[in-house]
Image: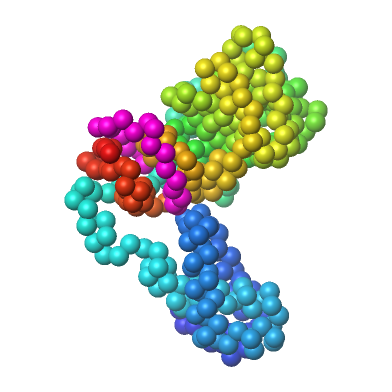
Amino acid sequence: MNRKKDNHILENYRLGRCSKEELNQLETWYDSWNRANRISLTEEELQRVESKMRLNVMKRVGFDRTARKWGRIHAISAVAAALVITIGVAIYHSILQPQTGEIAASANYGSDIAPGKNKATLTLPGGEVVTLIGEKNAVVVDKNELIYPDGTDIATATSQQAYGTTSIPMHTIVTPRGGQYQLILSDKTKIWLNASSSVRFPTSFTGAKQRRIEISGEAYLEVTKDTEHPFLVKTGTQEIEVLGTRFNVSDYTDDAVAQTTLLEGSVSVKPLYSTMAQNLPKILEPGQEVLISNRKVTVRSANIKQTLAWKNGDFRFEDESVPAIMKQIERWYDVDVVYTDNLSEVKLNASISRYRNVSQMLKMMEKTGEVHFKIEGRKIIVSK
């Protein structure tokens, strides 16, 4: 960023004489800030930041006069952008970041642990394992090649054979604990993988009557509609059939419950075990979810905000047990959790960005007085 040039644009904005190009630059700055912070901040924090941003910048640049001159939309975007450059960082640090020594004030937090990040491996059909570049954040299947979103090559896929043959070359993306990644399939279906998850997929659906993939762990999918070629997702406990929809599936091998939540469209969920009465497909409507546990299938209304919190960069727990919360923390922060007391009946409410250090999450939970934590290396000790 050219500070002198940027300050010139801001001064022109203050004086109400920005060119169209300069206004576009201000809006670009604001959009960039908005996208970045909607990943790292909670909704409450965003409202606090933006409210204070508007208040401060209006005082500095004369909002009413500028709004009349340039129009409300341009003014609002430029106001926020101006503050991002001039005082946005200071506001963020002053109202959101912990004060110096806040974490160190607790003797139990002898060390801190950074959050997870984009991290995964790709296994090719021949068994070769490729470590994916975190900064690239996604794998794109394009014309029988695996590339990053910027067009950089990852691998050229093995030629596909039509479905119905004995050999279908499949690729697998695996996220470890503390990792997440994205995948865009050849039909433009988008998949977000949570930590400790995997997706197994072909690089082409050519010749297939159905588009089939396999998922372990948790993933959010936006499936491209194709009525002639249903999309099938197989997990350890269920098979999900869709035509075109948005949904989340969570089916970890170490969880007692498998969960499929529908946001848009329609899905058919079929348990894979043999009890005939419960093996019938369950048809979900938007806003519903199906739970599969102990050979029991339950359909109920879903808490969409809580289900999709991970995909939106947050932790969001509503009346959630401590062990369930800590299991998510284990996966995302790549830590081991040890209990000195039975806390299975203790339920908490919490909401915080997944991109905060683990100590900040733990301190929020400790404020309830129901639970306490101690960090030792990459181990978290939980007690009453």
Colour scheme shown: rainbow
Image point (58%, 18%), residue name: 296
Q: Position of residue 314 (x, y in %)?
A: 48, 49
Count of numbered badges drawn on the protein = 0
Give the magenta range: 331-354
Judging depth in this view, the residue of 16 and 139 nearest the camera is 16
**Res 225 quadrant in image:** top right
Can you name the residue that lies furthest to the bottom here? 15
State which quadrant residue 244 falls in.
Answer: top right
Report the quarter where the C terminus lies: top left
- Residue 43 in percent (x, y) is at 53, 57
299 to the left or right of 8:
right
In the depicted view, which residue is nearer to us: 334 or 314? 314
Left or right of residue 339, residue 140 in this image: right
In this picture, is 376 found above or below 93? above
Q: Is residue 355 above or below residue 185?
A: below
Q: Position of residue 191 (x, y in %)?
A: 59, 38
Which residue is rendered at x = 52% and y = 17% of the image?
A: 294
What residue is rendered at 50% in x and 41% in y?
Answer: 181
In the rendered image, the vertical position of residue 57 relative to residue 284, given as above or below: below
As for residue 323 lying within the magenta part, the answer is no
Q: Measuring from the top left, give residue 322's x and y in whole percent.
A: 38, 37
**Residue located at (40% from left, 68% from top):** 95
From this viewpoint, which residue is outermost toward the right?
228
Residue nearer the viewer, 275 or 312? 275
- In magenta segment, residue 336: yes
| Residue 239 seen in the figure | yes
